Image (tube, grey):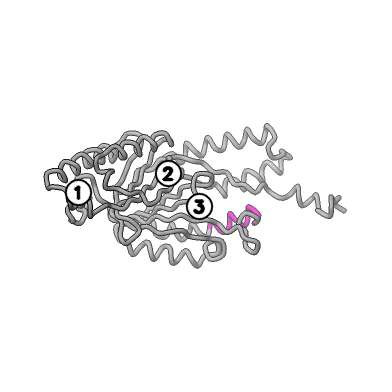
Amino acid sequence: MASTTSGIDTTTMKQQLPAVPITIEGSSVLHQMFRFRWTEWRKLGEQQKQEIAREAASLLEKLEHNEDGQTALFSLLGHKGDLLLVHFRQSFEQLKAAELQLANLKLSDFLEQTTSYLSVVELGLYESSVKMYRALQEQGVQPNSPEWNEVMQETIKRQTEAMRSRLYPQIPPARYICFYPMDRRRGEDKNWYQLPIEERQRQMEEHGLIGRRYAGLVKQIITGSIGFDDWEWGVDLFADDPLEFKKLIYEMRFDQVSAVYALFGTFYVGVRCPASGFSGLLSGKLPPQG
Protein backbone atom coordinates (compact mmCIF):
# COMPACT_ATOMS: atom_id res chain seq x y z
CA MET A 1 0.00 0.00 0.00
CA ALA A 2 1.28 3.50 -0.82
CA SER A 3 2.46 5.48 2.17
CA THR A 4 0.46 8.50 3.20
CA THR A 5 1.18 11.78 4.94
CA SER A 6 -1.79 13.38 6.73
CA GLY A 7 -4.11 11.27 4.60
CA ILE A 8 -2.52 12.27 1.28
CA ASP A 9 -1.41 9.49 -1.09
CA THR A 10 2.28 10.22 -1.71
CA THR A 11 2.31 8.01 -4.81
CA THR A 12 -0.32 10.28 -6.36
CA MET A 13 1.75 13.28 -5.34
CA LYS A 14 4.80 11.91 -7.14
CA GLN A 15 2.81 11.16 -10.29
CA GLN A 16 1.17 14.57 -10.50
CA LEU A 17 2.84 16.83 -13.03
CA PRO A 18 3.91 20.37 -12.11
CA ALA A 19 1.02 22.80 -12.38
CA VAL A 20 2.72 25.76 -14.09
CA PRO A 21 3.14 25.53 -17.89
CA ILE A 22 6.14 27.02 -19.64
CA THR A 23 5.54 30.42 -21.19
CA ILE A 24 7.76 32.37 -23.56
CA GLU A 25 7.55 36.12 -23.89
CA GLY A 26 8.29 38.63 -26.63
CA SER A 27 7.27 42.19 -27.43
CA SER A 28 6.33 44.64 -24.71
CA VAL A 29 2.89 46.07 -25.46
CA LEU A 30 1.02 49.17 -24.33
CA HIS A 31 -2.54 50.17 -25.21
CA GLN A 32 -3.50 53.79 -24.57
CA MET A 33 -7.13 54.94 -24.76
CA PHE A 34 -7.90 58.65 -25.04
CA ARG A 35 -10.83 61.03 -25.16
CA PHE A 36 -10.33 64.01 -27.45
CA ARG A 37 -11.35 67.43 -26.14
CA TRP A 38 -13.36 68.43 -29.19
CA THR A 39 -14.88 71.50 -27.52
CA GLU A 40 -11.44 72.99 -26.84
CA TRP A 41 -10.18 71.95 -30.27
CA ARG A 42 -12.98 73.82 -32.05
CA LYS A 43 -11.93 77.05 -30.33
CA LEU A 44 -8.61 77.07 -32.21
CA GLY A 45 -7.98 78.87 -35.47
CA GLU A 46 -7.54 76.80 -38.62
CA GLN A 47 -3.82 77.53 -38.95
CA GLN A 48 -3.15 76.51 -35.33
CA LYS A 49 -5.10 73.29 -35.84
CA GLN A 50 -3.07 72.46 -38.92
CA GLU A 51 0.25 73.08 -37.13
CA ILE A 52 -0.73 70.85 -34.20
CA ALA A 53 -2.03 68.13 -36.52
CA ARG A 54 1.12 68.21 -38.67
CA GLU A 55 3.39 67.89 -35.65
CA ALA A 56 1.39 64.91 -34.36
CA ALA A 57 1.20 63.23 -37.77
CA SER A 58 4.95 63.58 -38.21
CA LEU A 59 5.62 61.78 -34.92
CA LEU A 60 3.00 59.11 -35.68
CA GLU A 61 4.68 58.47 -39.02
CA LYS A 62 7.98 57.82 -37.23
CA LEU A 63 6.35 55.61 -34.61
CA GLU A 64 4.56 53.59 -37.27
CA HIS A 65 7.91 52.59 -38.77
CA ASN A 66 10.04 52.53 -35.62
CA GLU A 67 12.85 49.95 -35.94
CA ASP A 68 12.36 48.69 -32.38
CA GLY A 69 8.62 48.08 -32.81
CA GLN A 70 5.52 49.69 -34.20
CA THR A 71 2.75 52.03 -33.11
CA ALA A 72 -0.71 51.96 -34.66
CA LEU A 73 -3.50 54.51 -34.24
CA PHE A 74 -7.17 53.58 -34.24
CA SER A 75 -10.30 55.73 -34.07
CA LEU A 76 -12.55 54.13 -31.45
CA LEU A 77 -16.26 53.54 -31.97
CA GLY A 78 -18.70 54.41 -29.19
CA HIS A 79 -18.50 56.25 -25.87
CA LYS A 80 -15.42 54.53 -24.38
CA GLY A 81 -12.97 56.87 -26.04
CA ASP A 82 -11.95 58.56 -29.28
CA LEU A 83 -8.44 57.28 -29.95
CA LEU A 84 -6.55 54.06 -29.28
CA LEU A 85 -2.79 53.89 -29.63
CA VAL A 86 -1.20 50.44 -29.66
CA HIS A 87 2.57 50.25 -29.14
CA PHE A 88 4.71 47.14 -29.69
CA ARG A 89 8.33 47.53 -28.51
CA GLN A 90 11.36 45.53 -27.40
CA SER A 91 11.16 46.64 -23.75
CA PHE A 92 9.16 48.58 -21.18
CA GLU A 93 11.72 51.38 -21.39
CA GLN A 94 10.97 51.79 -25.08
CA LEU A 95 7.26 51.89 -24.28
CA LYS A 96 7.94 54.67 -21.79
CA ALA A 97 9.92 56.57 -24.42
CA ALA A 98 6.92 56.40 -26.78
CA GLU A 99 4.64 57.66 -23.99
CA LEU A 100 6.92 60.62 -23.34
CA GLN A 101 7.18 61.51 -27.03
CA LEU A 102 3.40 61.64 -27.28
CA ALA A 103 3.04 63.57 -24.01
CA ASN A 104 5.33 66.30 -25.38
CA LEU A 105 3.18 66.95 -28.43
CA LYS A 106 1.04 70.09 -28.48
CA LEU A 107 -1.80 67.71 -29.28
CA SER A 108 -1.52 66.24 -25.77
CA ASP A 109 -3.28 69.34 -24.42
CA PHE A 110 -6.40 67.99 -26.12
CA LEU A 111 -6.03 64.36 -25.06
CA GLU A 112 -7.40 62.85 -21.86
CA GLN A 113 -6.14 59.32 -21.25
CA THR A 114 -9.08 57.31 -19.92
CA THR A 115 -7.28 54.01 -19.39
CA SER A 116 -4.35 51.92 -20.57
CA TYR A 117 -3.18 48.33 -20.64
CA LEU A 118 0.36 47.01 -20.17
CA SER A 119 1.40 43.49 -21.17
CA VAL A 120 3.89 41.35 -23.10
CA VAL A 121 3.31 39.02 -26.03
CA GLU A 122 2.97 35.56 -24.49
CA LEU A 123 2.84 32.02 -25.85
CA GLY A 124 1.76 29.33 -23.41
CA LEU A 125 3.45 26.01 -24.20
CA TYR A 126 0.97 23.59 -22.66
CA GLU A 127 1.68 20.69 -25.02
CA SER A 128 5.46 21.04 -24.80
CA SER A 129 5.28 21.42 -21.02
CA VAL A 130 3.25 18.26 -20.49
CA LYS A 131 5.53 16.22 -22.78
CA MET A 132 8.67 17.50 -21.09
CA TYR A 133 7.32 17.07 -17.54
CA ARG A 134 6.27 13.48 -18.29
CA ALA A 135 9.64 12.61 -19.86
CA LEU A 136 11.57 14.06 -16.92
CA GLN A 137 9.28 12.33 -14.44
CA GLU A 138 9.83 8.97 -16.15
CA GLN A 139 13.59 9.57 -15.87
CA GLY A 140 13.23 10.23 -12.16
CA VAL A 141 14.30 13.88 -12.45
CA GLN A 142 12.93 15.98 -9.60
CA PRO A 143 11.19 19.31 -10.35
CA ASN A 144 13.40 22.36 -9.76
CA SER A 145 16.56 20.26 -9.55
CA PRO A 146 19.60 21.49 -11.53
CA GLU A 147 18.98 18.85 -14.23
CA TRP A 148 15.30 19.80 -14.43
CA ASN A 149 16.08 23.52 -14.68
CA GLU A 150 18.70 22.91 -17.37
CA VAL A 151 16.15 21.09 -19.56
CA MET A 152 13.65 23.90 -18.90
CA GLN A 153 16.08 26.58 -20.04
CA GLU A 154 17.04 24.60 -23.14
CA THR A 155 13.36 24.18 -24.03
CA ILE A 156 12.63 27.88 -23.54
CA LYS A 157 15.63 28.87 -25.66
CA ARG A 158 14.72 26.47 -28.46
CA GLN A 159 11.05 27.45 -28.53
CA THR A 160 11.86 31.16 -28.39
CA GLU A 161 14.04 30.89 -31.48
CA ALA A 162 11.49 28.74 -33.31
CA MET A 163 8.63 31.14 -32.56
CA ARG A 164 10.45 34.46 -32.84
CA SER A 165 8.11 35.79 -35.55
CA ARG A 166 5.11 35.15 -33.29
CA LEU A 167 6.80 36.62 -30.22
CA TYR A 168 7.81 39.82 -32.02
CA PRO A 169 4.96 40.31 -34.49
CA GLN A 170 4.25 43.19 -36.81
CA ILE A 171 0.98 44.97 -36.07
CA PRO A 172 -1.35 43.58 -38.76
CA PRO A 173 -2.48 46.14 -41.38
CA ALA A 174 -6.15 45.16 -40.99
CA ARG A 175 -8.84 47.84 -41.07
CA TYR A 176 -10.33 47.04 -37.62
CA ILE A 177 -9.11 46.13 -34.15
CA CYS A 178 -10.94 44.52 -31.23
CA PHE A 179 -9.11 44.60 -27.89
CA TYR A 180 -10.26 43.18 -24.56
CA PRO A 181 -8.66 41.92 -21.33
CA MET A 182 -9.63 38.62 -19.72
CA ASP A 183 -9.10 36.37 -16.70
CA ARG A 184 -9.51 32.71 -15.82
CA ARG A 185 -11.85 32.04 -12.91
CA ARG A 186 -10.28 31.59 -9.48
CA GLY A 187 -13.47 31.29 -7.43
CA GLU A 188 -14.44 28.76 -4.78
CA ASP A 189 -16.62 26.77 -7.20
CA LYS A 190 -14.65 26.99 -10.47
CA ASN A 191 -10.91 27.53 -10.30
CA TRP A 192 -8.85 27.18 -13.49
CA TYR A 193 -5.59 27.09 -11.56
CA GLN A 194 -6.59 24.02 -9.56
CA LEU A 195 -7.19 21.86 -12.62
CA PRO A 196 -4.43 19.34 -13.48
CA ILE A 197 -2.15 20.64 -16.22
CA GLU A 198 -3.23 17.82 -18.55
CA GLU A 199 -6.85 18.94 -18.33
CA ARG A 200 -5.90 22.56 -18.93
CA GLN A 201 -3.88 21.44 -21.96
CA ARG A 202 -6.89 19.56 -23.35
CA GLN A 203 -9.20 22.52 -22.96
CA MET A 204 -6.71 24.98 -24.45
CA GLU A 205 -6.17 22.70 -27.45
CA GLU A 206 -9.93 22.63 -28.04
CA HIS A 207 -10.04 26.40 -27.66
CA GLY A 208 -7.22 26.87 -30.17
CA LEU A 209 -8.93 24.76 -32.83
CA ILE A 210 -11.71 27.35 -33.08
CA GLY A 211 -9.24 30.18 -33.55
CA ARG A 212 -7.42 28.31 -36.29
CA ARG A 213 -10.66 28.03 -38.27
CA TYR A 214 -10.60 31.84 -38.59
CA ALA A 215 -7.06 31.94 -39.99
CA GLY A 216 -6.94 34.40 -42.86
CA LEU A 217 -9.97 36.28 -41.50
CA VAL A 218 -8.81 37.27 -38.01
CA LYS A 219 -5.27 37.78 -36.74
CA GLN A 220 -5.01 37.19 -32.99
CA ILE A 221 -2.22 38.34 -30.67
CA ILE A 222 -2.33 37.24 -27.02
CA THR A 223 -0.43 39.19 -24.38
CA GLY A 224 0.22 38.26 -20.75
CA SER A 225 -0.35 40.85 -18.04
CA ILE A 226 -0.12 38.98 -14.72
CA GLY A 227 1.83 41.31 -12.46
CA PHE A 228 1.57 44.17 -14.98
CA ASP A 229 -2.13 45.10 -15.06
CA ASP A 230 -5.52 44.37 -13.51
CA TRP A 231 -6.38 41.40 -15.75
CA GLU A 232 -4.37 38.31 -16.63
CA TRP A 233 -4.29 38.53 -20.43
CA GLY A 234 -4.99 41.00 -23.20
CA VAL A 235 -6.40 39.91 -26.55
CA ASP A 236 -5.96 41.84 -29.79
CA LEU A 237 -7.99 40.78 -32.81
CA PHE A 238 -7.39 42.34 -36.23
CA ALA A 239 -9.70 41.94 -39.24
CA ASP A 240 -10.95 43.75 -42.32
CA ASP A 241 -14.53 42.74 -41.51
CA PRO A 242 -15.55 43.53 -37.90
CA LEU A 243 -18.32 40.91 -38.01
CA GLU A 244 -15.60 38.28 -37.83
CA PHE A 245 -14.86 39.45 -34.25
CA LYS A 246 -18.44 38.66 -33.23
CA LYS A 247 -18.46 35.28 -34.97
CA LEU A 248 -15.14 34.16 -33.48
CA ILE A 249 -15.81 35.30 -29.92
CA TYR A 250 -19.38 33.95 -29.97
CA GLU A 251 -18.22 30.52 -31.16
CA MET A 252 -15.50 30.44 -28.52
CA ARG A 253 -18.06 31.10 -25.78
CA PHE A 254 -19.34 27.55 -26.31
CA ASP A 255 -16.06 25.74 -25.66
CA GLN A 256 -15.39 24.56 -22.12
CA VAL A 257 -12.51 26.85 -21.21
CA SER A 258 -14.55 29.95 -22.10
CA ALA A 259 -17.98 28.77 -20.98
CA VAL A 260 -16.78 27.65 -17.55
CA TYR A 261 -13.56 29.51 -16.73
CA ALA A 262 -13.37 32.78 -18.71
CA LEU A 263 -14.10 36.29 -17.45
CA PHE A 264 -14.03 39.17 -19.94
CA GLY A 265 -13.28 42.84 -19.43
CA THR A 266 -14.22 45.89 -21.50
CA PHE A 267 -14.20 45.54 -25.29
CA TYR A 268 -12.74 48.27 -27.50
CA VAL A 269 -13.32 48.36 -31.27
CA GLY A 270 -11.60 50.84 -33.57
CA VAL A 271 -10.93 51.76 -37.19
CA ARG A 272 -7.29 51.98 -38.30
CA CYS A 273 -6.06 55.50 -38.99
CA PRO A 274 -2.66 55.78 -40.69
CA ALA A 275 -0.54 58.81 -39.83
CA SER A 276 -1.25 60.21 -43.29
CA GLY A 277 -4.95 60.39 -42.41
CA PHE A 278 -4.64 61.91 -38.94
CA SER A 279 -5.26 65.52 -40.00
CA GLY A 280 -8.38 64.42 -41.83
CA LEU A 281 -9.59 62.54 -38.75
CA LEU A 282 -9.34 65.73 -36.68
CA SER A 283 -11.39 67.46 -39.39
CA GLY A 284 -14.18 64.93 -39.07
CA LYS A 285 -13.23 62.68 -41.98
CA LEU A 286 -13.33 58.89 -41.86
CA PRO A 287 -9.82 57.38 -41.70
CA PRO A 288 -8.64 56.36 -45.17
CA GLN A 289 -7.93 52.76 -46.09
CA GLY A 290 -4.30 51.87 -45.32
Q: Residue at x 51, y 41 (%)?
A: 24
Mark 1 to mark 3 CA distance (whole Å): 33 Å
Q: Nearer the viewer, residue 184 or 17?
A: 184
Which residue position is annotated with label 1?
277
- Left or right: where 102 falls relative to 96: left
| 3D distance between C-alphas at marks 1 and 2 | 29 Å
User: Mark 3 or mark 2: which is in front?
Assistant: 3
**Is residue 251 a member of the stretch shown in magenta?**
no
Helix, strand or loop at label 2? It is helix
Q: Which mark is residue 231?
A: 3
- The residue at 33%/64% (across/down) is 243
Q: Is residue 212 left or right of residue 217?
A: right
- Secondary structure under the numbered disc 1 in the rendered image: helix
**Vertical comparison of 156 with 186: above or below:** above
State the residue position of label 2: 166
Residue 74 at least partly seen: yes
Q: Position of residue 40 (x, y in %)?
A: 22, 51
Which is more N-terminal, label 3 or label 1? 3
The type of residue carrying mark 2 is: Arg
**Would you say the magenta stretch is mainly helix, strand or loop?**
helix
- Residue 95: quarter of image: top left
Name the residue nearer the viewer: 231 or 162. Answer: 231
Quarter of the image for residue 261 reads: bottom right
The amino acid at mark 3 is Trp
Q: Which residues are magenta?
A: 195-205
Q: Are there few (<14), some (14-19), or many (20+) residues within 10 Å of tag 3? A: many
**Residue 176 appears in view:** no
Q: Work out whether residue 69 or residue 116 is closer to the camera in this orientation and state it.
A: 116
* Disc marking residue 2: none
